[in-house]
Image (cartoon, coloured by chain):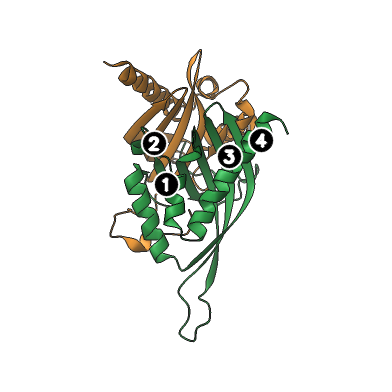
Chain colours: A green, B orange
Amino acid sequence: MTPRTAEAAQVEEANQAFYDAVETSDLDALEEIVLTGPLAETVSVVHPGWPVLRGRGEVMRSYALIMANTEYIQFFLTDVEVAVDGDTALVTCTENILTGGPAEEDGSAGTLVGALVVATNVFRRTPEGWRLWVHHGSPVLADGDDDDEDAAGPGA
Amino acid sequence: MTPRTAEAAQVEEANQAFYDAVETSDLDALEEIVLTGPLAETVSVVHPGWPVLRGRGEVMRSYALIMANTEYIQFFLTDVEVAVDGDTALVTCTENILTGGPAEEDGSAGTLVGALVVATNVFRRTPEGWRLWVHHGSPVLADGDDDDEDAAGPGA
């Protein structure tokens, strides 16, 4: 394993730990993953369909809210791509999400809904390991094939 | 002006130049703004509603396609926030977009449509200035107020 590959593997582990924390509603684990220190006020997160949340405090509050309102969520990550340059690492991935509402009155599981979200995650290297600086998730509304010209919505 | 502020101003200029290039359908200007070199294959862009595009070639082709299919587009940027750390800079902003279809048969302008998109842009420092490494734009579907709990869609 080259040093570069080992580094990318560490970043991918940090990325997986981030999703594991959300999946298991483990706010303490998430606290460890989200960047602290001088850049804490610049931590930024966009949940699918949301405006930008900026600053570690606002970001953590949003996750507490999401966790409190999500009965069940599971992430199957695909298309995970990692790039490392110096102390910055970029991860892009597809979040294949299975989420469920509250259990039915008879005790059976609530309705499961699938969702397709793509994410851009940026990590910073710290003495304690790679920490999440930026997360931007957005719904995939088109398949983005080259010949699917109508899919080109507004935006840069 | 402190060095840090001057740096942030340079990043904001690069960010504005990116939107100006799309607004004026200037693919050559965009070629100058998008990162080249060793990280070129890791350049990643998400257009609103699209999957991830990765690699400079694929990214530039998508912009050529968007420019060819966009009669008119204007960006009013608000909430522009810049953070610089070493050779990496993070910009988040709201793209208040005004876009228009083809002109009517009588020569009058096509219908204008407004759209609200939030963007996360990451720039890298190069000898030629700050260059775009990552762009992720996504539609804002909820106002994200703290008390707007129903807005919490699935996703990390």
On residue A11, which mark appears? 3
Label 4 sits on residue: A6
Q: Chain of mark 4?
A: A
- Identity of the residue furthest to the top in this view: B127
Residue found 40% across the figure and 59% down from its top: A66
The percent coordinates of residue A99 (x first, y second) are 52, 65
* N-terminal-most mark, 1 or 3: 3
User: Disc 2 on helix, strand or loop?
Assistant: strand
User: Disc 4 on helix, strand or loop?
Assistant: helix
Label 2 sits on residue: B92
Q: Are marks 3 and 4 in contact (CB under 8 Å)?
A: no
On residue B84, which mark appears? none
Q: For the residue carrying disc 4, how many other residues have a C-alpha within 10 Å: few (<14), some (14-19), or many (20+)?
A: few
Question: In the rendered view, would you say B80 is above or below A55?
Answer: above
Q: Chain of mark 2?
A: B
The percent coordinates of residue B8 (x first, y second) are 35, 23
Question: In the rendered view, would you say A55 is above or below B149?
Answer: above
- Identity of the residue furthest to the bottom in this view: A106
In front of the other: B81 or A90: A90
**In the rendered image, residues at marks 3 and 4 fall on the same chain:** yes
Q: Chain of mark 3?
A: A
Is residue B20 rendered to the left or right of residue B4?
right
Amino acid under disc 4: Ala
